Image: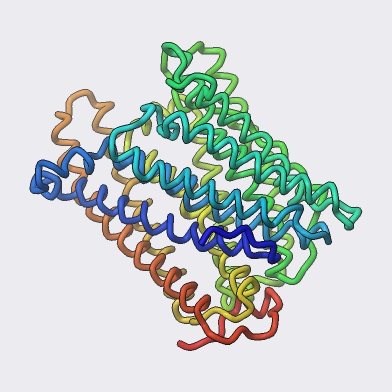
Amino acid sequence: MLTLSAEPGSASRRFFYSAIFWLIVPGIIGLTLATFLYVPSVYDSLPLTLKPYLSFGRIRPAHVNLMIFGWLSQAYAGGILFILPRITRARLFSERLAHANWWLWNLMIAGAAITLPLGLTQGREYAEMIWPLDLLLIVNWVLLAINIWGTFARREEPKVYVSLWNFMAATIIFAGVYAVGNKIWDPSGAYTGMNDNIVNYFYVHNLFNSWFTTAGLGLAFYLLPKLTDKPLYSHRLALWGLWSVWTGQHHQLYSPAPDWLEYLTIVFSILAAVPTIAFMVNFFMTMRGRWGRAAEDVALRFLVTGALFWAFTCVQGVAQSFRTFSMYVHFTNWVIGHSHLAFVADYSFWAFSLIYLMIPVLVRRPMYSRKLMEWHYWLTTVGMTIFMVSLWIGGLIQGQNWLTYSTPFIETVKSMQPYFALRLVGGLMAGVGVLCMAYNVWQTARQPAPAPALSPAAAASGGGGE
């Protein structure tokens, strides 16, 4: 039923529910892709009528776009809408507008889920959605920005917490990054020649910088003091996280792009150490005396694990921006492992923390099962570690073989089989963990009698049936 409810928190709850759904769908696609890589004969055995729709070149973009804009972006939106009234001491600017935003967002994702397997694509990495969906994405981000800035304008809290600065910056900047990167004024979505490659990777990298990192740090700066029951170590230091580093061309080193542009983006990539160190100092100083809580609080454990993985991501990112190391790992499975480290082990772990903190508050009852929360954490953490480490090792072997100029390419392909097997095993473990979370949230939401409103700390601890 189409409703635009004005009930506080109802839009946030819907965003979380749909985010979990859109995590499962591309997760299944990802496992399908991993199966095809490990056992190519599975694809060969498919009926001829299905092969075009399940070809790697079609469902890989579906996997990526549904994960990025369906799962994680909606989880971010749900978290932001939850947090805004609490740090401004004001009602959300428009709950009904947030519901309209939710409907349009899921219309966009459903459109991507249908068109990409059909081969309707603009054919540019992370920018495959067709022109009408590009326009709809801009509309969705503008609607979210209106709610953020509108709530900011009517705030009753005179001090502006760093999370609010991050949310306001992220929505405004990313809309511009997406518009330029996808050339939304042109239905083709593409520039000409090498310029298209340069702009495409400016967009790809700053999709993470301007949206997932900037907004993600805002979410983390809310979660950290809430889950540790301590004030943030330094608000001033946290503001350094606003100054995200703009880069992208280091993805295409040794390309026909101008050398000055490559060197400039290498410098910017190295400068990424500044906001990274600022965040990690704040993180460790705030966590001081609270590490023991992570053993009991699964939401805090996801946040802590995600923060440590995020620091490792940033170290890898700086290393990969150097020309020598990039030459060694570029086009290898190392890069796939790195991208999953950033997207899953960092930002998705923070999103899991959001869900375990906020869903119980929104539905006014504790999480159904603490055991399922534990299974989710350990299966996802161990599974993703196996997934990433196997790809990093496989990528280093690929790079070494290619640089010898003597190993036949097919031999390198064959040598990847055990690493693809581990990739599939790790992905299956993480997938089972996600299903544990989805079932836990579903059981939590369907419990018949709402309990009295819970404090976030009590809600995150879990407490229903086992």
The residue shown at (35%, 58%) is: 386
Location of the C terminus (image quadrant) = bottom left
Percent of width and height locating residue 278 = 71, 46
Where's residue 461, x and y in %? Answer: 60, 79
Instruction: Decide if residue 350 is in sight here.
Output: yes
Q: Position of residue 415 (x, y in %)?
A: 18, 43
Residue 266's spot in the image, x, y percent? 56, 25
Q: Nearer the viewer, residue 258 or 31?
A: 31
The quarter of the displayed image where residue 62 is located: top left
Q: Is residue 62 above or below residue 255?
A: below
149 or 177, nearer to the observer: 149
Can you say whether 121 is above or below 337 in the image?
above
Q: Residue furthest right?
A: 158
Instruction: Identify the residue shown where x is 62% and y is 35%.
Output: 174
Classify residue 360 as left or right of residue 429: right
Q: Nearer the viewer, residue 154 or 159?
A: 154
Residue 384 falls left or right of residue 424:
right
Image-based side of 162 in relation to 219, left or right: right
| Whether residue 292 is visible | no
Residue in the image at 82% along x and 57% along y: 88
Quadrant assignment, res 379: bottom left
